[in-house]
Amino acid sequence: MNVSSIFSLVFLSFMLMGCQQQSGIVPEELPMTEKKEQMVQQAKWQQGEVVFVELEGGFWGIITNDGQKILPHGLPKALAVAGSKVRFQGKIIKDAVTIQQWGQVVKITKAELVSSGKQKHYY
């Protein structure tokens, strides 16, 4: 066997191994009922208090009624009043890295005012 034949065999072997590994990466398609169920779970309303956290230059957060810290992405400016009670829906952004390092990052999809805070806007 010459060098080019050996090289071709090795190259072909790597190509075949790569094809076998990729087949395990493709996720199975969920039935439509499971997809709808996941969407409903993501759309669960939560309630909490808007806070202004004075770290890293300051940022807005929400502390839910059960004590969970939420770092809201897309909180409407009208609701950015410390002490306000809000209801919101959102999608958790997993593996998000922020300079704040505070709370779970959530993309706010809907939000409404429950009761107004006493403090001024920081914008």
Image (cartoon, grey):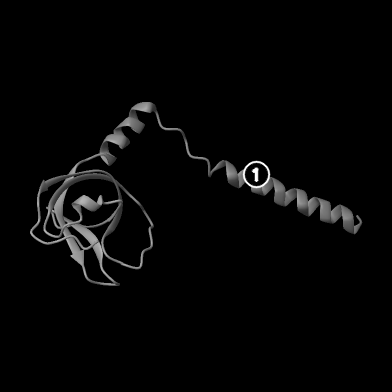
In this picture, residue 18 sits left or right of residue 2? left
In this picture, residue 42 sits left or right of residue 49? right
Which residue is located at x 36 percent, y 64 percent? 98
Position of residue 95 measured from the top left corner of the image (x, y, whole percent): 38, 57
Question: Quadrant of the image for the C terminus?
Answer: bottom left
Position of residue 113 measured from the top left corner of the image (x, y, whole percent): 14, 46
In this picture, residue 5 sits left or right of residue 57? right
Question: Quadrant of the image for the N terminus?
Answer: bottom right
Residue 7, quarter of picture: bottom right
Circle 1: element type: helix
In this picture, residue 74 sits left or right of residue 22? left
Image height of 52 relative to 9, above or below:
below
Viewer-proximal residue among 71 and 114: 114
Viewer-proximal residue among 25 and 86: 86
Which residue is located at x 10 percent, y 46 percent? 114
- Residue furthest right as drawn: 2
**Label 1, residues with CA under 10 Å away: few <14, some 14-19, many ≥20:** few
Which residue is located at x 48 percent, y 39 percent? 27
Position of residue 74 measured from the top left corner of the image (x, y, whole percent): 30, 51
As shown in the figure, which amino acid type bears the numbered disc 1? Cys
- According to the image, label 1 marks what residue? 19
Viewer-proximal residue among 38 and 11: 38
Position of residue 57 measured from the top left corner of the image (x, y, whole percent): 29, 71
Residue 122, quarter of picture: bottom left
Which residue is located at x 17 percent, y 61 percent? 51
